[in-house]
Image (cartoon, rainbow, N blue to C red):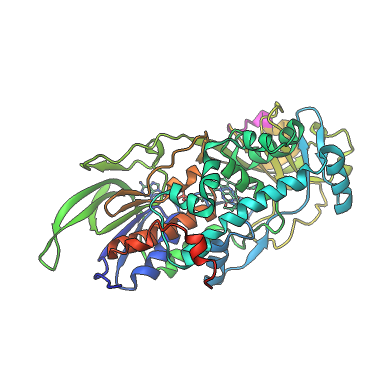
Amino acid sequence: AELRAPPDKIAIIGAGIGGTSAAYYLRQKFGKDVKIDLFEREEVGGRLATMMVQGQDYEAGGSVIHPLNLHMKRFVKDLGLSTVQASGGLLGIYNGESLVFEESNWFIINMIKLVWRYGFQSLRMHMWVEDVLDKFMRIYRYQSHDYAFSSVEKLLHALGGDEFLGMLNRTLLETLQKAGFSEKFLNEMIAPVMRVNYGQSTDINAFVGAVSLSCSDSGLWAVEGGNKLVCSGLLQASKSNLISGSVMYIEEKTKTKHTGNPTKMYEVVYQIGTETHSDFYDIVLVATPLNRKMSGITFLNFDPPIEEFHQYYQNIVTTLVKGELNTSIFSPRPIDKFGLSTVLTTDNSDLFINSIGIVSSVREKENPEPSTDGTYVWKMFSQETLTKAQIVKLFLSYDYAVKKPWLAYPRYKPPEKCPSIILHDRLYYLNGIECAASAMEMSAIAAHNAALLAYHRWNGHIDMIDQDGLYEKLKTEL
Ligand SMILES: Cc1cc2nc3c(=O)[nH]c(=O)nc-3n(C[C@H](O)[C@H](O)[C@H](O)COP(=O)(O)OP(=O)(O)OC[C@H]3O[C@@H](n4cnc5c(N)ncnc54)[C@H](O)[C@@H]3O)c2cc1C
Ligand SMILES: CC(C)=CCC/C(C)=C/CC/C(C)=C/CSC[C@H](N)C(=O)O
């Protein structure tokens, strides 16, 4: 198909994994001559960030990556980064009174324990997640053939039809109840996984529930040196221009270009320190949540006006403590026989944390070495900032604590109606995909999709957008 001259300038707002991967894909599609400006008001990486504890860095936000997250895998390979193993150690589940489940070092013992308490539900749960992931993986084939989708709903529908899209409208709880899972299994096994990953209950939508449960698969990994290295790497590889400023307004205006033609462009007004600046762009991608004005961006004079984004984001606090855990809270066993490195909690535990686990620094290839003095670095997730009294209750002794509050991910409340991807003619929004599920890979998928969408719409290739029957069409193609 014939190509129009590429755009002169593209703006991306937000240098998290969404914005930086968008820069990477836009460069691949539009070529070397387009100027790409990437605006970031805080740190490159966004919700991928580390915190330092006694001279070592630990992941404070997005930390684990699934072995089937192919975009993240590809970035790491293309950027020449290394990976570290991100899971390991024994897990326990605490219900406020006792540990209702404790993993053992022996695979066979775990199997017997699981079957004894829950029958074959654990196996059936893995099969359900595998089925969702199988369909989810179709996105890679569609994107490798350059197909794009104009809405999150159309993207999900292309993966597995009405049934797959319908997962956004049903809670995980009702989906698994209908599939015959017991209350006991849902309370003791499924709910704690939702609490550690999304700080929410099993009332979240079934798709994000499956994404969350996939974190129990083996082979989770992270980037050596910190996951945020992917963002700085993509920024550099895309040869984009980082503008360390805060975008305040976006407005459509008519500009006379160097060709002499009046052209509709977007004016992006931003602040660096106390100074206000502005620039004009052919295409703008917003790669930060717009929910409840979280990003402070105002869309000026759009007709019709840009929609409002109402969904709340969940408060989650990450706390890292170097200290000796007071294991007696969880188990009457002597401290040297405790053996667990992660404790998840059920929804009815009165504990003030969602989870607690030993973490390795971003430089450690394997699990932490056994400690000689009983102290480890522990990561806790909680809804509220932990008080000193609460930390003292959890630890026999500690000598370091750091905290980071997040507006972490959407508060899921099915039925979900996802925000639009196309906000205006050449104005695109990536983070609507978080209403289905928030994860690094989801932002990378949204970024690839938005880059393809912007490219096809720019060139009038409408046959590459929202194609029906893609799965059948591409089944036989390499
Ligand atoms: C505690 C926690 C744990 C998590 N764990 C995992 C995990 O283990 N695995 C996983 O896959 N995912 C995890 N996630 C989710 C994952 O981190 C996010 O889905 C992903 O990082 C979102 O990336 P993003 O680029 O879309 O958004 P963000 O990372 O939020 O990037 C948006 C960027 O835009 C910037 N910005 C906002 N407004 C403006 C403005 N007006 N002007 C300029 N810049 C602006 C922000 O400063 C930010 O840097 C976790 C998230 C949290 C909070
Ligand atoms: C998108 C697909 C198919 C899989 C992604 C699975 C994944 C890695 C989801 C992330 C879920 C999430 C938000 C986890 C937060 S907590 C992570 C970890 N348990 C920790 O302790 O930091």
User: x, y (%) of residue 298?
Assistant: 29, 41
User: x, y (%) of residue 212?
Assistant: 62, 46
How many discs appear? Answer: 0
Residue at the image position 80 percent from the left and 52 percent from the top: 371
Q: Is residue 255 left or right of residue 356?
A: left
Q: Is residue 54 left or right of residue 164?
A: right
The residue closer to the viewer here, 89 or 454, is: 454
Q: Is residue 131 visible?
A: yes
Residue at the image position 54 percent from the left and 59 percent from the top: 138
User: x, y (%) of residue 114?
Assistant: 83, 43
**Magenta segment boundaries in residue numbering:** 384-390
Residue at the image position 70 percent from the left and 27 percent from the top: 348
State which quadrant residue 30 falls in: bottom left
Q: Is residue 189 left or right of residue 290?
A: right
Q: Is residue 216 left or right of residue 30?
A: right
The answer to if 385 sits in the magenta stretch is yes
The answer to if 476 sits in the magenta stretch is no
User: x, y (%) of residue 446?
Assistant: 45, 54
